[in-house]
Image: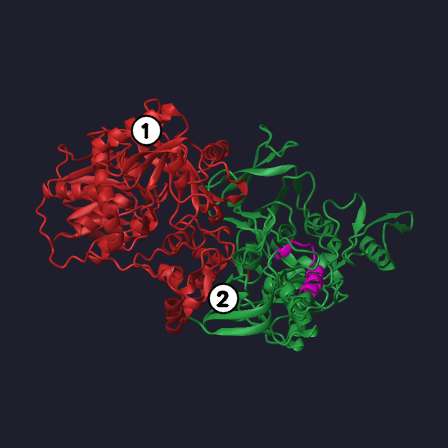
Chain colours: A red, B green
Amino acid sequence: MPALDADVIIIGAGAVGCAIARELSRYEASILVLEKECDAAYGTSGRNSAVVHAGFNNKHGSLMAKLCVEGNKGFEALAELLNVPYRKTGKILVAFDEADMQELARIKARGEDNGCTGLRLIDGTELHALAPKLRGIGGMLSENTAIFNPFEYCIALAENALVNGARFVFNSEVTAIRHDDTGFTVTAGENLCRCKVLINAAGLYCDKISAMLGINDYRIYPCRGEYFILDKIAGSFLNIPAYPVPRPGIGGLGVHLTPTIEGNIIIGPSAEYISERDDYASTSEIMAKLFTEALDLLPGLERRQIIGNYCGIRPKQAPPGEGGFRDFVIKNEPAVPGFINLIGIESPGLTASVPIARMAAGLVSENMPLKPKNDFIARRRGRVKFSALTQDEQQRLIAHNPDYGEIICRCQNITKQEIRDAIENPFGARSISSIKYRSWATTGRCNGGYCMTRIVDMLVNEYGLKPEEITYRGKGSEMFSGRVK
Amino acid sequence: MTNKEFCGVLVIGAGPGGLAAAKSARESGAESVIVLERNTRPGGILNQCIHDGFGLIRYGKALTGPEYASLALSEALSSGAKILTGHHVTAITPEREVTAYSRSGIRTFCAKSIVLATGCRERTRGAISIPGDRPAGVFTAGVVQELVNVRNIMPGKRVVILGSGDIGLIMARRLTLEGAQVLAAAEILPSPCGLARNVSQCLYEFGIPLYVSTTVTRIIGRKKLEAVELSDVDADLKPIAGTERVIECDCLVLSVGLIPENEIAKSAGVRLNPDNSVRTDEFLQTSVPGIFSCGNSRHVMDLADYVSEQAELAGTNAVRFINGGHMLTWDEEKTNCMKKGFPDKDTITCTVCPNGCQIKYSSGTYSGSKCARGIAFAEQERTSPRRTVTTTIRRKDGVLLPVRTAGTVERGRVIPMVKMIRGMEFCGSEVLDVDGETLKVSAV
């Protein structure tokens, strides 16, 4: 087995793991991230509503509330620094009756207690000025809620950490951990890794990692949320996220409508406790319900605008029956010196990921000295997004590199060079999903009918992959059986 | 900004529609006709339709897709139309200014009239919301056709087809010929959507079961497709509990409908119908004056031959729009005219022409045929059925070339011949001899 040593090992390359890796890469310490999937953001971090929350939904005094508010405040600057698509759209909680308005007044007060700013109750006139097609008699506007691209965000954090010296090892599921006076020995896939400080950012599997070190205090209850994605044509219906007033005990925020950075609308999520943590299946019952509930908010939607669906799974600590949210656990485990647990990082974990990472770095410094580097590179150069450029800029790029003149994804107008940039990512992730997360190809109304074969052609003829080596989402998801002849 | 290039008739798309529109626009007197095609070669989707049966009306013989395309291309070229491949149109204005991206730059064309011939796209899994996992191994039929016939990639070994659209039926046969096992085709409606001749020649002939009033109710397989669950549906097309059965497979092919491709049309403000087809007048003109629409992008059609005919009319009218002449009208009956669904019981589905006559044989006489050719065909089918063999042959560099037998062979020889050709390598000659039959390679 190859041996990999580091000062700090982080288990999990979700938003939290990647943010911690980036945060720690500010210091003179060797960092190693272990991930069971073939790329970052393959779990909960990439399967959600893609919203930067304001922090009014969380219990006053909780870590969730504190870190979410902090995360929201810093997100715009962070997105700019990391070159991640971000838009401060605001968000509306829609009231259907007076009782809802009263509940919203309570939510607003709680939000302000939490430190949220920009919360305002609005009447029907203002509601319909903001979103003419929504139903409702009024609502609460949260001005600081935003939308972003969570894949690009996680990848940006990881790439920035990488540039600053952190190492990432993918396809390496942690199966055993040994702890002794000298530190930790972690078996991850084919690798045997050693470290002084071990951070558990395993999301849905955090309780299992914790149990590998004999700490059995936690249990994760996977809670699935299903989503629909609507065509961009529906995007003109709504340009601000619209949520119902949260009902107590549902363990989610209720089925809501969220415009995406790319101009689609997402409907969802549902909230359903399930028995297996990797069961991302959609169900006919929930799919029927989602659309009906979405129509309550936005009556103009039509079924034929649906272009896809997906699921995310929340790593909940609150068991079925209890409902609601249990606060994040982020702490040094006294029973195992050097072991830092992050448990139950569900929503608003994405928004809070960088404040969580700062907190984790603080916990690391209790175990080992952290000396700041003087050559930390804070800015990440993003990839070129050709369709966002002016025609003159585009013309110049094509003159310099003809691959910018060849459109590979016709739904999203993504060029061959952008696919190339995605394929040539520093992590060597070459699954179709990894290319999709970086380029946004295959996400349109044709579900990749046009671009997938062209991407496959590039992988085979320009990057030397065999057809049977091409995967949808890493090992085990091979897309083709081989050549015809 | 880019320089503007002026032209008479601008055609978008070089499939059968675009090529025919360009030809007729030139023949109707347009001085400059430009066809913009995003692919590197003209022909559109015909290039991947290597089976035969095209051209029965227009050219009076059964051609493969690539053969039909190459005839249509040479007609367009000899008419003097200019075809620009590798030009991807992204937008049109109502003033008929067209933006196209190419490897040599962004070009803006100002046209006096425009013909939209942008074809159609396939309905997807996402659009029909099939429940279950989202593994690798679920494809639309057109994608599978491109993979198998053009890209030399086999999507799987054990295949289930959902939907009975024509491409799905054609691919059931094609995948079988290339060595896959097609386990079933399931259609949610009580009868097939595809042409009767395809049900007969692509499913029945290969013993592939077709389950009607049946749909896929669950896709199973976390990473890679492992199985699909089929269920019967009731009269409202709702699955009936208790009828579920699971079929193990590694590939699910969706043939669940085609949607006219009109995103570019929309950018010009062209009015569409709820099914994304284009609202035209009887002259094939859209709601935006001077912009015409034809073929599958206007309204999905059964037959390339009628696409070409309709497109010729659109091309002519595009010129008459410029010159102020009176326009010609399209006979809407031709848009979708062929026999669909199950072949009638105990009949022979005639494939000599698109009528698809259902011919019955009883005590020495044939009934149901509209012509003598049909009777001859039925006699042949009854006594010793013959088929054209169509497949691909691999060139040394891995590129696949479509091939066909010059004539027909005994039906039983089709599978062994395709298998034989699968092991061969193209040696540079356009005519080959395989198993005593002459094979023609097209699109070399």
- Is B308 part of what is drawn in magenta? yes
Q: Indicate which disc residue B99 carries.
A: 2
Q: Viewer-proximal residue, A233 or B36?
A: A233
Count the marks: 2
* Residue drawn where x is 49% and y is 32% of the image: A292
**Quick check: do tags 1 and 2 share a chain?**
no
- The mark lying in front, picked from 1 and 2, is 1
* Residue drawn where x is 33% and y is 25% of the image: A102
**Residue at the outermost right position:** B364
- Is A480 part of what is drawn in magenta? no
Q: Position of residue B416 (x, y in %)?
A: 66, 59
Q: Viewer-proximal residue, B153 or B279?
A: B279
Q: Secondary structure at mark 2?
A: strand
Check the residue under mark 2 and report the chain it is in: B
Question: Magenta part of the protein: which range?
Answer: B297-314
Q: Residue B16 occupies which quadrant of the picture?
A: bottom right
**Residue at the outermost front position:** A125
* Residue drawn where x is 55% and y is 65% of the image: B96
Q: Residue A183 occupies which quadrant of the picture?
A: top left
Q: Position of residue A111 (x, y in %)?
A: 25, 32
> Where A452 sits versus A62, above or below?
below
The amino acid beneath tag 2 is: Thr
Q: Tell me the crowding category of disc 1: few under 14, some 14 to 19, or many 20 or more residues within 10 angstroms, Cα based.
A: many
The amino acid beneath tag 1 is: Leu
Q: Indicate which disc residue A482 carries.
A: none
Q: Secondary structure at mark 1?
A: helix
Label 1 – label 2 distance at C-alpha:
49 Å
Residue B432 visible in image: no
Q: Viewer-proximal residue, B353 or B81?
A: B81
- The residue carrying mark 1 is A104
Q: Position of residue A437 (x, y in %)?
A: 37, 52
In screen coordinates, is A135 left or right of A167? right
